[in-house]
Structure formats: structure tokens, C-alpha cells
């Protein structure tokens, strides 16, 4: 069985990745970076807890097979674009490099539709720069998920986002939602499904970087998601 490491374990997608990993019989241990106590009580989950994120890379655990990153913040939460970059780009790169140095073969990143290193939009530019950086590292497999608008309970009030979620769910009733929005748990299941495929050698011979667009996420996280993936 595999050992997985997760960064972003308390975020919208990351929390679902954590619960999905904890439910999988294919994983013996999940080591989860966190700045605060985790609510997940699975005996397989081992928190790497520190409020000082500058220590995280140095404490990357040995003998892990897969590293998942759902780590990210918003400009408002960070207090500006420069501070957001420290998390979304700098810390992610530090952790990815630590994972590569530790011998991790499979790296799974939750990115975003529109990621582009040359974009004039700070968010898209940061995501694109991160994608390019991790793609050049020494992993055997680099999986990049590019979901659209994320649906789910973030535990905080965002008026505009709340309106957009309502619109997305209404469009889902007429079959339009999958083309621009995905449920956070679907994205998480797709990430775990794809990561385990690589771990089990089902992607041998394929290109190193596997880009998963919204249609791939829906397919792996919902359409083709079966109980055998987590039993």
C-alpha cells in the first residue's frame, strides 16, 4: 500500500481529498500538512501541524509515493497579490521540490482552468507559473487538474460566489454545469483516482505530464468513479 502526502488539507478541495484518501484501502498512511488541528479522525491520517509554513518543506516525510497539493489562498485572505503568491507559487514550489528530492514519483496538483504563465491576470499567471515549475521537476508523473468554478461549502460567506454557486446548480439541472463548474468532491475523487492509476502503473508509457480538463475531472471523479476505487 502507498503513503500519500497532502498539502492544503483544510481547503475546499483538499479536505475532500483527505477524506477520500482516508477511505481508500490502497493507502496505508496519509501525512497531511496543516496549520491547525484537523477534524478528520481516521487513524491513517498523520498531521504535520505547524503554523509556520516556512518549516514545511524541511519536514517533508520520507518514503511517500504520492504527493497531492490543493494548497492555495485568495488575494483577500492573504492581504494582497504579493502575499498570495508566497502561498500559491512559492510554498507550492518548495513543497514540490522537497517531494521530488524525497523520491516521490507521482505529484498531483489542483490548478485552475485558464492557468497561463504569460497571463495578465495575477491568479491565472500564478497557476501557470506553478504548473510550468512542477512539470520540470524530477517526478515520474505530474498530474495537473484544471477544474472550473468550484462548488461546495467553504465555511465562509462570499456573496458573489454564493450567487454563482446557485446559478451553477440551476444550470446542472439542464446539463450545463459540467462545462464550467465542478463539485469539490468530484474534483477530489478525480485527483485520487488519477494519482492511484499512476501509482499502480496504469499510466506507464504515457507522457510525464497529464493535464486533466473539466471533462476529464467529471469522468474520473463521477462518471467512472466506482466503489472499487476506495474499497
Image (cartoon, helix red, strand yellow):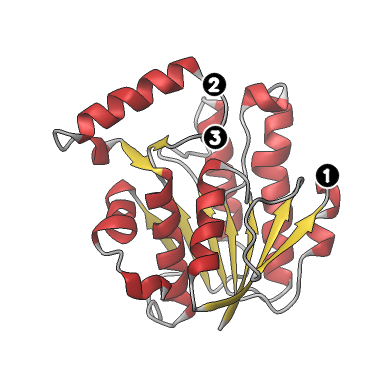
Mark 2 Cα shell of 10 Å, populated few (<14), some (14-19), many (≥20): few
Whole-percent x, y for residue 157 in the image? 54, 21
Can you identify the residue that label 3 sits on? 125
Whole-percent x, y for residue 40 in the image? 62, 56
Label 3 or label 2, whichever comes before in sequence order: 3
Residue depicted at x 46% and y 64%: 192
**Circle number at residue 157:** 2
**From the image, which quarter does the N terminus lie in?**
bottom right
Can you identify the residue that label 1 sits on? 51
The residue furthest front is 41
Check disc 1 and report its element: helix, strand or loop.
loop
Give left or right: position of 193 versus 173: right
Depth-wise, is mark 3 or mark 1 nearer the camera?
A: 1
Q: CA distance from mark 3 to mark 2?
A: 26 Å
Label 2 or label 1, whichever comes before in sequence order: 1
Residue 166 figure quarter: top left
**From the image, which quarter does the C terminus lie in?**
bottom left
Residue 9 drawn above or below residue 158: below
Residue depicted at x 52% and y 65%: 21
Q: Are marks 3 and 2 in contact (CB under 8 Å)?
A: no
Residue depicted at x 61% and y 29%: 74
Residue depicted at x 84% and y 48%: 54
Mark 1 Cα shell of 10 Å, populated few (<14), some (14-19), many (≥20): few
Residue situated in front as seen by the camera: 72 or 137? 72
Residue 45 drawn above or below residue 213: below
Whole-percent x, y for residue 7 in the image? 65, 54
Amino acid at each position: 500500500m502507498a503513503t500519500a502526502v497532502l498539502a492544503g488539507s483544510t481547503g475546499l478541495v483538499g479536505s475532500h481529498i483527505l477524506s477520500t484518501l482516508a477511505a481508500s484501502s490502497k493507502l496505508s498512511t496519509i501525512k497531511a500538512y496543516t496549520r491547525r488541528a484537523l477534524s478528520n479522525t481516521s487513524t491513517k491520517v498523520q498531521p504535520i501541524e505547524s503554523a509556520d509554513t516556512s518549516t514545511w518543506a524541511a519536514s517533508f516525510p520520507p518514503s511517500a509515493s504520492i504527493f497531492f497539493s490543493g494548497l492555495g489562498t485568495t488575494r483577500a485572505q492573504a492581504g494582497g497579490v504579493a502575499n498570495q503568491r508566497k502561498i500559491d507559487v512559492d510554498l507550492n514550489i518548495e513543497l514540490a521540490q522537497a517531494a521530488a528530492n524525497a523520491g516521490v514519483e507521482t505529484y498531483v496538483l489542483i490548478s485552475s482552468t485558464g492557468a497561463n504563465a504569460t497571463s495578465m491576470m495575477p491568479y491565472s499567471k500564478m497557476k501557470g507559473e506553478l504548473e510550468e515549475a512542477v512539470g520540470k521537476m524530477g517526478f515520474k508523473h505530474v498530474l495537473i487538474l484544471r477544474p472550473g468554478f468550484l462548488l461546495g461549502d467553504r465555511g465562509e460567506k462570499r456573496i458573489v460566489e454564493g450567487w454563482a454557486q446557485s446559478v451553477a446548480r440551476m444550470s446542472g439541472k439542464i446539463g450545463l454545469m459540467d462545462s464550467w463548474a465542478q463539485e469539490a468532491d468530484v474534483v477530489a475523487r478525480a485527483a485520487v483516482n488519477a494519482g492511484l492509476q499512476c501509482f499502480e502503473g496504469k499510466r506507464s508509457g504515457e507522457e510525464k505530464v497529464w493535464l486533466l480538463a473539466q471533462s476529464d475531472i467529471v469522468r474520473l471523479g463521477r462518471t467512472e468513479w466506482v466503489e472499487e476505487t476506495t474499497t
